[in-house]
Amino acid sequence: MIDATGAVQAEAQWAFAATPLAELTAIWQSTLYRLIEQIPASIRQDITRIAIDGTSATVLLCDRQGTPITEPLLYNDGRGIAMMEQLKQIAPANSVVLSATSSLAKLLWLIHHTPGTLENYYFLHQADWLAFLLHGKLGISDYHNALKLGYDPEKLEYPSWMKQLPLPPILPKVLAPGTPVGDVTPEIASRLGLHPDCQVCTGTTDSIAAFLASGAKHPGEALTSLGSTLVLKLLSHTRVENADYGIYSHRLGNLWLTGGASNTGGAVLRQFFSDRELEELSHQINPEQESPLDYYPLLKRGDRFPINDPDLSPKLEPQPANPVEFLHGLLESIARIEARGYQLLQQLGATPLTCVYTAGGGAKNTTWTAIRQRQLQVAIQPPRHIEAAYGTALFVRNRF
Ligand SMILES: Nc1ncnc2c1ncn2[C@@H]1O[C@H](COP(=O)(O)OP(=O)(O)O)[C@@H](O)[C@H]1O
Ligand SMILES: O=C(CO)[C@H](O)[C@H](O)COP(=O)(O)O
């Protein structure tokens, strides 16, 4: 919760454990309510606007009451691969929807696998559905979450080629991120102790929120999110789209947030090491020396960026007996993938990189920062605000 000057007034967190897909939406709902309830009651009443960021391309179908009728399809769910041939025949060559994990591939998969007519159902992103729980309005999204659904953020409309797809009339109406949609419902106001006039606004995606929170704001500045996955965002005067490399651009005011998201990252590190081991072993690595080990660290087959190939095999061999050497190889290899990503963005026309902010669990690893600095050859900065939620709050304080 921030005030008009951008100062943090309250902060709340709620961690949830690995949960079966079928129970996830219930957990999201209780987490949202718990987070709001953690804000001291005395200032909760002062909240004037709320916006939510969600994981990009995490989607679900719900009925006209807003009750989910399917389990959610998470951001990295690749079952949309079955719809790629259909999509390739219709979508433009470099469209962001040409990925097995895109929201549109997931929608086509759901249409194909959900019995009965979809006319009565809404297709929503995670952030849209959570906002609905507060304002009670279905069928509304923002042009960040809707990008991977095919929405054109330049013309501000769904493109004409989408009309050739057998899409039911349930596509969300798309607004700019941070646009007020409605007041909290009377039930939510009394249940959560919010002011009845508190507005709920359209949201954004987790990585865009993290970018804004970092303090990056000039073309050439970038954010790398080293969370479970590796996400790159470089602010640019020009828009860049390339489906072969999984590169796309989000609209940010009059600029473009170019980048891509790889399935490599901290989740692979966690497969081999605890967070404590990561910290201890990293201290034993000499970051000035390049590891000769050349991996492509993935949990399972398939990556989106900088190689967009749902069949790409993980490469994690040879594994040295010494865990310090193995970790060095993993950190070095992820840093190479990051450097390759920024190199491609610039080769394809993005504004040249000047500095990189880092967010996510890997940002605190100073050894990794030194390895990345050697690979990237630009300054690496800590983010001004670590929590992505800060960036989302900026949208409703000061709309872009
Ligand atoms: N010291 C460390 N060095 C490198 N990576 C780390 C370290 N500590 C935690 N991580 C990684 O950070 C990830 C969690 O970061 P977080 O930003 O919370 O991820 P998420 O994308 O799931 O929100 C884990 O996958 C973990 O492997
Ligand atoms: O790994 C992800 C989890 O959400 C996303 O793909 C990543 O955040 C990038 O998506 P976007 O550019 O739309 O924010």
Image (cartoon, rainbow, N blue to C red):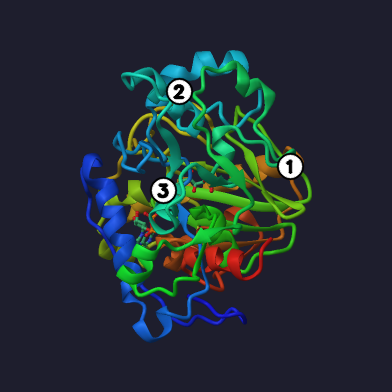
**Secondary structure under the numbered disc 1 in the rendered image:** loop
CA–CA distance between discs 2 and 1?
A: 27 Å
Q: Nearer the viewer, residue 173 or 26?
A: 173
Q: Quadrant of the C terminus?
A: bottom right
Q: Nearer the viewer, residue 204 or 266?
A: 204
The residue identified by callout 1 is: 239
Residue 188 lies, with reference to residue 344, above or below; the image says below
**Secondary structure under the numbered disc 3 in the rendered image:** helix
The residue identified by callout 2 is: 108
Residue 307 lies, with reference to residue 39, above or below; the image says above
The residue identified by callout 3 is: 129
Residue 233 lies, with reference to residue 341, above or below; the image says below
Q: What amino acid type should be assigned to the residue bearing mark 3?
A: Trp
Q: Residue, x 45% and y 57% (percent of image)?
A: 135
Which label's residue is closer to the chain start, 1 or 3?
A: 3
Q: Point out the frontmost of discs 1 and 3.
A: 3
Query: Which percent across, then down, holds residue 87?
Result: 55, 18
**Secondary structure under the numbered disc 2 in the rendered image:** helix
Q: What amino acid type should be assigned to the residue bearing mark 2?
A: Leu
What is the crowding at mark 2: few (fewer than 14 residues within 10 Å), some, or many (at least 20)? some
Q: Nearer the viewer, residue 368 or 163?
A: 163
Would residue 13 be seen by someone viewing this image from the given angle?
Answer: no
Q: Is residue 66 left or right of residue 178?
A: left
Would residue 361 be seen by someone viewing this image from the given angle?
Answer: yes
Q: Is mark 1 within 8 Å of ligand 2?
A: no
Q: Residue, x 44% and y 63% (percent of image)?
A: 184
CA–CA distance between discs 1 and 3?
A: 29 Å
Residue 10 lies, with reference to residue 357, above or below; the image says below
Query: Which percent across, then down, holds residue 256?
Result: 71, 49
